[in-house]
Image: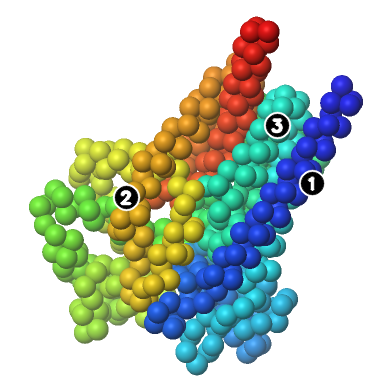
Amino acid sequence: MQLINKDYSKKKFIIVIFSFLLSVLISTYFVFQYDTYQLDNFTHIMLKEETFAHWFQAANIIEQLKQDTNFFIAGNEVFTKPLPQRIVAIYSLILNFDILNVETNQINLGFKLPFLIFQSLFYYFSVLYFYNNLGNLCSERTKIFILLFLCLEPTVIQYHSSFWSESFYFSIQLIVLGLTLKLDKKIFDFLLLGFLLGLLFLQRTVGIFYIFIIIIYFITFSNEKKIKNLFLILIPYIMVLSLLGLHNYLRADRFYIMPTESSYSQYRYFTKDILATKMNKTISEINKIEVEKGLEWIDLNLPEANNYELEKNKTLLGLARSIKNENLRIDFYDYMKTRNFEILLDYPFETLKKSIKGMTHFSVLNPFFVYYDLEYFKNYSSHIIGDFYFSDKHKELIPYRIFYSLLIFSIILIGFFKLFKQNLKLTILCTFSILYYYILLGWYGKTRLFVPTLIYFSIFFGAGLDFLVSRIKLFYLSKK
């Protein structure tokens, strides 16, 4: 048995080291190819949309620090995930390079590869930590198959060579999962778990409620000191959220925790389409109607924000962003959130129908996303965003993606039933973790938002592949 464990331990390190080197190689290729500008000679190919926002805000933080602003209160409105911009700012300070050309607001070239190498290193460390805490929850061979999936599955590993927020999010997920499954947890482990659950939210907003999955798990399956351990988890979690709220209060005289994009993202990408369908109008017509409603709400509730400039806006989000005062702007974001729920409640059948459609798209794996997102973006001007999704190549790849998804999920389904019989509590933890992301993000239908579920699916995949290998071996032996 000891020899077998040593053999698996050797395989574990070979897989992780090989995967890390492969990730570095891919990152090097991407930086060599795409650390440059579009045809407009301004927009950076690798840093656009959300990723550009993180790096731009990091540059703002650094500029404020140069003016002797405290690091804790430096920054602007928390409109999206607050941790990525802080990571970039710290990275920039350590390597002592300027993110932006301050005269043109153009991302400077260079200094990208060390960032990608670090996030890969952190991820593979997290994988090892998670692997070592699986203990006797599943067989050694199942654990190796889980490791192979986490280290080499292309839908996952592509993000280590990009500047999207996924890679660090995966790493935090894995350490959280490892701590949750760890036997003989000490006080420090529970405190660290609560702290990391707070970071999970700071890295991506969807992580804010995941603590309830962990709490329910411990209440259901923990045998001792339940109340004490829950407090140990909650205290650092609440502290992390409180520090974010305090940051906003000291900076803008408004205590708030949720990034403001959470108030309008569903309305912007989902709910307006429902309204357009039910009212039989174009999106432009819906925007006009909604802006008029928004202006009426401002007249009644925020008269101090109303001015001629607001009436020029063509969308409700544009109207919100035109309100100069952050406190008043957040009040209007709250109106957008309320308006969103009003529409969803008015059209429950259409909401359900569109949500199911979104979840179907959500579940189709996309191992090509990062490469083609970069490759197709490089030849366009900055005003064209998301162009790959409208390309012939995107349509051409759909059958391959569906086939690959069906293959992976077939193995996962087998693994689910196997693990259900062998380890019910691990099955429940993974299943509810997967459902968590489906419920909160499935409506969007964007495959990039689906990938955090693969961290939990990996356990079912490992169990399923182990089962298949066992059956193939038995079949081969029976033929001898």
Q: Position of residue 283 (x, y in %)?
A: 18, 61
- Name the residue carrying label 2: 395
**Which of pointers 2 and 3 lies earlier in the amino acid sequence?**
3
Q: In this view, does 470 lie above or below 336?
A: above
Which amino acid does the dot numbered 1 rest on? Phe
Q: Which residue is drawn at 62% across and 84% down?
A: 98
Q: Residue 301 carries which label?
A: none
Q: Is residue 332 left or right of residue 274?
A: right
Q: How crowded is mark 1: few (under 14 residues within 10 Å), some or many (20 or more)?
A: few
Q: Residues within 10 Å of mark 2 (few under 14, many from 20)?
A: few
Q: Do the residues labelled 1 and 2 touch (CB within 8 Å)?
A: no
- Residue 188: image tag: 1
Q: Residue 84 is drawn in which quadrant? A: bottom right
Tell which of 306 and 36 is nearer to you: 36
The answer to whether residue 334 of the structure is visible from this angle is no
Residue 470 shows up from this direction: yes
Quadrant, the C terminus: top right
Q: Which residue is drawn at 44% across and 32% down?
A: 406
Residue 36 percent across, percent down from the top left: 51, 77
Q: Residue furthest left?
A: 280
First of labels 1, 2 by sequence position: 1
Q: Please, which residue is most extreme toward the right here?
A: 2
Name the residue carrying label 3. 143
Q: Where is residue 242 in the image (x, y as percent from the top left)?
A: 60, 60
Q: Residue furthest front?
A: 480
Look at 72% across and 49% down and name the residue there.
Answer: 18
